[in-house]
Amino acid sequence: MGNADLIYPSTNMECAHRVAIPPAQPFYKTLKSSLKETFLPDDPLRQFKNQPPSRKFVLGLQYFLPILEWAPRYTFQFFKSDFIAGITIASLAIPQGISYAKLAKLPPILGLYSSFVPPLVYAMLGSSKDLAVGTVAVPSLLMASMLGKEVDPVQNPHLYLNLAFTATFFAGVLQASFGFLRLGFIVDFLSHATIVGFMGGAATVVCLQQLKGLLGLKKFSTSTDIVSVMTSVFSQTHKWRWESAVLGCCFLFFLMVARFFSKKKPKFFWISAMAPLTSVILGSILVYVTHAEKHGVQVIGHLNKGLNPPSLTDLEFGSPYLHTAIKTGIITGIIALAEGIAVGRSFAMFKNYHIDGNKEMIAFGLMNIAGSCTSCYLTTGPFSRTAVNFNAGCKTAVSNIVMSTAVMITLLFLTPLFHYTPLVVLSAIIISAMLGVIDTDAAIHLWKLDKFDFAVCMSAYFGVVFGSVEIGLGVAIVLSMVRMMLFIARPRTLVLGNIPNSMIYRNMDQYPVATRVPGVLIIRIDAPIYFANASYLRERITRWINNEEDKLKELQENSLQYVILDMSAISSIDTSGISMLEEVKKNIDRRGLKLVLANPGSEVMKKLDKSNFIQDMGQEWIYLTVGEAVGACNFLLHSCKGENTRINSTAPDNNV
Amino acid sequence: MGNADLIYPSTNMECAHRVAIPPAQPFYKTLKSSLKETFLPDDPLRQFKNQPPSRKFVLGLQYFLPILEWAPRYTFQFFKSDFIAGITIASLAIPQGISYAKLAKLPPILGLYSSFVPPLVYAMLGSSKDLAVGTVAVPSLLMASMLGKEVDPVQNPHLYLNLAFTATFFAGVLQASFGFLRLGFIVDFLSHATIVGFMGGAATVVCLQQLKGLLGLKKFSTSTDIVSVMTSVFSQTHKWRWESAVLGCCFLFFLMVARFFSKKKPKFFWISAMAPLTSVILGSILVYVTHAEKHGVQVIGHLNKGLNPPSLTDLEFGSPYLHTAIKTGIITGIIALAEGIAVGRSFAMFKNYHIDGNKEMIAFGLMNIAGSCTSCYLTTGPFSRTAVNFNAGCKTAVSNIVMSTAVMITLLFLTPLFHYTPLVVLSAIIISAMLGVIDTDAAIHLWKLDKFDFAVCMSAYFGVVFGSVEIGLGVAIVLSMVRMMLFIARPRTLVLGNIPNSMIYRNMDQYPVATRVPGVLIIRIDAPIYFANASYLRERITRWINNEEDKLKELQENSLQYVILDMSAISSIDTSGISMLEEVKKNIDRRGLKLVLANPGSEVMKKLDKSNFIQDMGQEWIYLTVGEAVGACNFLLHSCKGENTRINSTAPDNNV
């Protein structure tokens, strides 16, 4: 037997595959491809490829103004559907808008303003066919609690209002720049579990706040946690107004029944969609007829007629509270963005069209910037309104234009009608909407699937309910980060065994039939190696080797000779990872064992080569599959003992 | 052909392996194992297994006081080595201690105090045989800059001193609690690249600060950035003292030559180890003889005789500056910990013994808590001193005790000798030590191996040099986090092809010989799936399918029929990941394709089962290897066309 065979024993096997060192790529090329992967993962430029310049211009225009893409194909059939959907969501938007503006401690008319301009902007820029634009409860509450801490909305309403516009402006700038810079993935770092918990908690808090309106109280705790609210409510039992409470409960019951019915029979979605407006009309008539406003039932009062006044000059860039406005804008902007993107994506899934998250962010951002200049506050794509829009059969963003027109007509002619609308009806509308946000099914699903995710969800929930919205959000983000850090810092390592009658090697815990290969320990690392997990992996590999040696000692078997590292799953490695491998190799050498690598990827091979690791260990110790590595080890083990046969050579050659 | 064959076509292949759903584990069991993996990855309790209680008690005592483990085996031979090493490091510790105390703007005597008590504590608790305890430059500088911002060390020396003790106390508490709570992995989140850059930058800043002593300046910039320092130096050219500068340069030259010589011939390590003390002695004699202190050469002046006074009552727990002390303690504590642990580990690697990082943290923490009560400031295991200790042939931590004793004798009898020591010699000692910390080789290595790591390193360096130590640290941490987030948010996905004449499937970019399987797209995801990368992966998989369909259209080949997801590397998955797979499946179904899974791990199988994903897709579409999955797809493709043969069936069965 020649020397070559000893060095590369698998050459006498049927298929010996070398792992080649990939040729070095020029730096700018790797940089370009990794930048592209980071910022353009969905390849938005694909459609521009191989197109004449004129076509490219049209495509580019369509990219930034999606309306240009679908408007030419718009038909009257579409318009009929969109008209019905638009009217339906307008009937929901008007009472909800007023309610949420109250929640944000802003003048109620702002809710209507915010349902007029932003939907028009979105209709031009947005790529979703189903999204209905409007204000949302949680960012409204957050705005009230963050701005309210600095400026009292009752004592200083003008400054408070201006700060709300300024916060909206910065939220828009943030959203648009996320989109332009293609940093949409930042939103992904809020995990589903934290969002479920946070939104549920915020919805609970919003409901608790409605006790004020429901019980007709005038003074109320400024804190939002359940303990303060309950103390505040039960310390004023003598001030509870039964008229208000009875009215509120009746309307809440009505709304809940309508909701329940529509949920059972999706065909009657319009019952739940129309219910809020019906409540408002009924409530207003009732108050007007019975003069209940004189008996403790608070009403909205006077609303200005007319369209949105401009508010560009109201933005408080020089105010000492600018810092607060920016902070509020950033936090509410991210929350609103997360909700809007998630809603847009879910409905796009149903109808099987694609939504570009970054493009949507630009649309949301510009819509809020435009809104902040026209007396609107933060808007996004609320789930409830979008679901109604979808169920009402909308075809394109024209339904937003229809809604906007309906709101415009309301603003121009109908605002006096809301004078007698009782606040308690608005409270009932908010509670009924919020009860739908508390997603117990999702929490149960989390519990079943992943206990840690459930714990994260519950922490966010209780953080909001017992602390404050900011505390809950902080807890949620910190827990998401911790979860992520644990994922990274503790990757899985496995010991592989041979599946009998094959040359497949698999995790011995998962496949109890898998058997150990005598004298060989096969370890698989199931994650990229980098600084955050390098020392853990070094310790863990040492521990596997220790355990194996102990076990062999107990069983009085032959001692360990080879350690095979299955590197298939190590997609990338940094300098700390390379040092770790060098240390592991030294450690293994010192124990008198031999390190063998199986199936390293191209990036790993490149870096191992550059750091002279491959030259140190010898390229003949790197195999394409674990099976081939084991084959070579066995060959050497037995040829050393003078037996020139391979264990497992009778098995079919199904290397893995 | 029966129905069974159609459903599970690979049964007529030689080896058809089912992927079983692992049996559900009780919750407490999975929790226990994952907690163990998170907090006890090195399994420190292994040695306690199957031991009688009395032995367990002894082992437990030895665990917390490693001295009990090695002291009984201590021999006179060991002592001879340790004695030489101890004296050598004492000769380095005394001048370095005084220099670093000056750097921290603390009384010079504190440098000696800090080389007396902490080494004794470490000798009992530490598990490293080579670590020499002492103060270090970068945390000293950091302490000066962070505390100096709040309290002026010249105008209010007493408060400044007390705050330094308090900061040391909190650093100790933090370090010990990291150890007790087994949170050592937090230190791993400072990547090697950031540490190289940060330490290099800090060393540069420390050198720049020495221009004050070297040029004999009295006034100096309080900022540490290069621009302020250079402005400060060159605006006072008329105040430069040539006597000081000449003396400093001579000693610096001497120290550098000694260093260079020792580096060339490691046998003469003691030349560089003794050089600082020699410089101090020569410098003092020179000043004493020439009365240079009257000609602009500043000297240390009076040092108190006597051992460390207690300082427990000096800790400022009620001070308004407590917040600053805690912050300083946390930041300097982490930096000191990172250095100490890294140094301990590296030298343990050389001598092939194991160091338990968490145990070391407890030792560092208790040593600093004890130090803060006995007039010491922050200590750790400096690299330079430990390297000298190692080269001097130390055997155990007794060398620390010897050093400590030597320092004690100095404190009791020899402090007056330092009266005439010129400050410029201390500056020269610091510069010569710091030039060793600037690790250009490591930076070049980073450039060669990983450009991003190099960029991180340089940002940290320039952040420190042009901004401040805190800015540099902030930049370093943020960049490490960004790097980590990018690693997570953008995992690698690959398209696999068939290696000819085998049934091995590998990345087509890495192995250009690999060929596509007609009608089948094989995608491999090389990372765990969770919330941070779920949406990216969804987009990316869609893009692979789009690209493949475009390519097939161009080539006018048969259209795509099957998408195989190789799940080998997906070690874990969270609820967002499961939702992502569900969406991908819907998407693939809607295109009229069929999703096939290959080799999901046990956790993935469990969660897919719990979420009813497996029931939805049918367990017959899950295969153990990509090869088997391709085999089944081909079988179905061809049996549908009425051709009952399989492509690739002539190749040997090396499934992967």
Image (spheres, coloured by chain):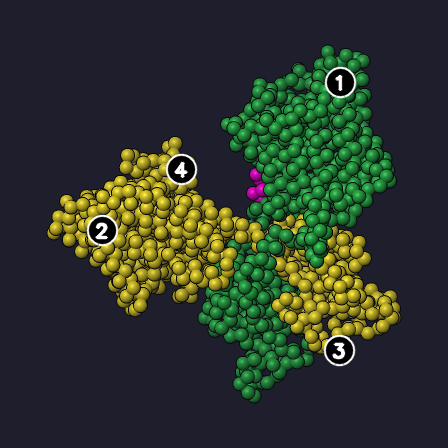
Chain colours: A green, B yellow
Proximity of marks 4 and 3: CB atoms separated by less than 8 Å = no
Residue that carries the numbered disc 4 in the rendered image: B324
Query: Residue, x 71% and y 24% (percent of image)?
Result: A307
Q: Inspect the image, locate mark 1, and give the three-letter code of the amino acid beneath it.
A: Pro
Q: Distance between the residues labelled 4 and 2?
A: 36 Å
The C terminus of chain A: image quadrant:
bottom right
Query: Going by the image, does B472 lie left or right of A653?
Result: left
- Residue B245, numbered circle: 2
Q: Quadrant location of residue A369?
A: top right
Pointer 4 with pointer 1, Cβ within 8 A: no
Residue type at tag 4: Thr
Q: Does the magenta stretch include residue A620?
A: no
Give a yes or no on whether discs 3 and 2 share a subunit. yes
- Sequence-wise, the earlier of marks 4 and 3 is 4
What is the span of residues highlighted in magenta in the rendered image? Answer: A474-479
* Residue identified by numbered label 1: A416
Q: Distance between the residues labelled 4 and 1?
A: 58 Å
